[in-house]
């Protein structure tokens, strides 16, 4: 779960880097809810979906 949280943070950091370099203008403020959603999705994935596979 922590690794998924860090991955989402890394993607947001990458988007901020692109924005600072003026390569692509990502709406980074809209990505912040993904940090909140990452934990429950990771929990559901590891405890309910992966055992079915």
Image (cartoon, rainbow, N blue to C red):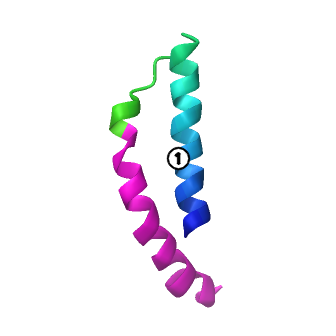
Compare residues 5 and 51 and report the one nearer the observer.
5
45 above or below 9? below
Q: Residues within 10 Å of mark 1 (few under 14, many from 20)?
A: some
User: Of all residues shown, which one is farthest toward the top?
Assistant: 22
Q: Is 47 included in the stretch rendered in magenta?
A: yes
The image position of residue 37, as x and y in percent, is: 38, 60
9 above or below 43? above
Kind of element beneath mark 1: helix
User: Which quadrant of the view contains residue 39?
Assistant: bottom left
Q: Residue at x 59, y 43 (%)?
A: 10
Residue marked by disc 1: 9
Q: Residue at x 46, y 78 (%)?
A: 44
Q: Is 39 included in the stretch rendered in magenta?
A: yes
The image position of residue 1, as x and y in percent, is: 55, 70
Q: Residue at x 53, y 15 (%)?
A: 20
Q: Which residues are magenta?
A: 31-53
């Amino acid at each position: 779960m922590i690794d998924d949280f860090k991955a989402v943070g890394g993607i947001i950091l990458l988007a901020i880097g692109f924005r600072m370099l003026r390569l692509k203008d990502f709406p980074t403020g809209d990505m912040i809810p993904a940090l909140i959603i990452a934990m429950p999705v990771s929990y559901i994935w590891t405890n309910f979906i992966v055992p079915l596979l």
